[in-house]
Amino acid sequence: MVTIKDIAERLNIAVSTVSKGLNGAEDISEETRQLVLDTAVEMGYSLKKIKRTATTKVCIFVDSQNMDYENEDQFGYELVNGFKKAAISRSWEVVIEPSQLNFRSLEKYDSYMLKNGYAGAFLLGFTLHDDWVRQLEKTTVPTVLLDNFIADNEKVGYVGTDSREGISQAVKHLVQLGHKRIAFLNGTKNSMVSEERNLAFRQSMEENGLEVDEKLVAYGYFVPDCAKTYVTGFVENGATAIMCASDLIASGVLNELNRLGKRVPEDIAVTGFDDLPIAAQLKPSLTTIRQDRSNLGKSAALMLDGLIRNVSMSKLLLRAKLVVRESTEK
């Protein structure tokens, strides 16, 4: 078991200096503190050794470029609230930290967790190419990811909604309405959940006896504006329905179809994914696949609690539910 003395000997510095670096003392340089933290992580020093209170301190890291969470219309709002509600019963201290890619390229994940005394974390909006996500392959810190999966590390788990189930329900619904030329506007390409939904769409089309026309499939981004790039092409290639990987994408699709003079659902049906509050407010109201985001947040806390207690958990998927509204029903 690694001790403070071991770290001091590795760095050839005083034990007291190592102790100061691990415990956030102000009378050492930031450079020395970071060196102590990085070395402690590399040597496998346990985070539990620096815990001084009975309160477990955990963090929700939110990628501020990919996830919004500050009001109820935003995807991350109920996720954060659900997690915080579950944390109350566990007497956890929850810190929310907006985070940007340039910061994460400079700070090592395990070192940052050690420096701040975090016992674990829930990561929102992170993508597969992120520096921290790559570091999670070897982290010793209990960590839960939304819609991302790290294999072969018992300290990292994944929570999400069953994309396969949700996409299957939506495709079946559209087929029952007589649609055969179904387009799919996906989210960003470097996202695990986008890849899952792409595969789910293709499998569901095949199960319903339909071929996937590659001219009717595209990766965009999880924002409304991406619809401007693809909707005209979908229409020109004969799409009678457009499935979207998020409600925000779907809202952009509805705007584009209106600009092109197409009626929804009479000319083209549209579906979304998430069931954000805006889905019921759009004109026409949006048929979508509901994610129970509050329960996703609670599930993340449940998983993180298990990981902290050395209960190895891999994946936790919630059921998806199709909510039918005016954008598909004539």
Image (cartoon, rainbow, N blue to C red):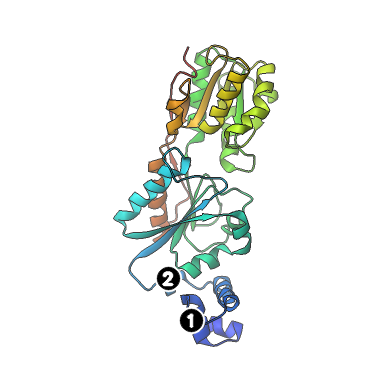
Query: Which residue in the protein does label 2 denote?
Result: 48
In the image, residue 303 above or below residue 46: above
**Of 267 and 55, the residue lying toward us:** 267
- Tell me residue 73's x, y (percent): 44, 37
- Kindly indicate the quadrant of the structure image that contains residue 195: top right
User: Secondary structure under badge 2?
Assistant: helix
In the image, residue 31 above or below residue 323: below
Q: Within 10 angstroms of label 1, few (less than 14), some, or many (20 or more) residues?
A: some
Tally of numbered discs: 2
**Of 70 and 18, the residue lying toward us:** 70
Q: Within 10 angstroms of label 2, few (less than 14), some, or many (20 or more) residues?
A: few
Name the kind of residue labelled 1 in the image: Ser
In the image, residue 329 above or below residue 111: above
Residue appearing at x 46%, y 28% in the figure: 279
Disc marking residue 19: 1
- Tell me residue 142's x, y (percent): 47, 59
**Of 147 and 210, the residue lying toward us:** 147
**Of 83 and 136, the residue lying toward us:** 83
- Tell me residue 267's x, y (percent): 57, 12
Residue appearing at x 42%, y 32% in the figure: 277
Q: Can residue 246 be seen from the camera position used here?
A: no
* Mark found first going from the N terminus, 1 or 2: 1
Disc marking residue 84: none
Marks 1/2: CA–CA distance: 14 Å
Name the kind of residue labelled 2 in the image: Lys
In the image, residue 319 above or below residue 4: above
- Tell me residue 236's x, y (percent): 69, 17
> Disc 1 vs disc 2: which is toward the camera?
1
Q: Can residue 280 be seen from the camera position used here?
A: yes
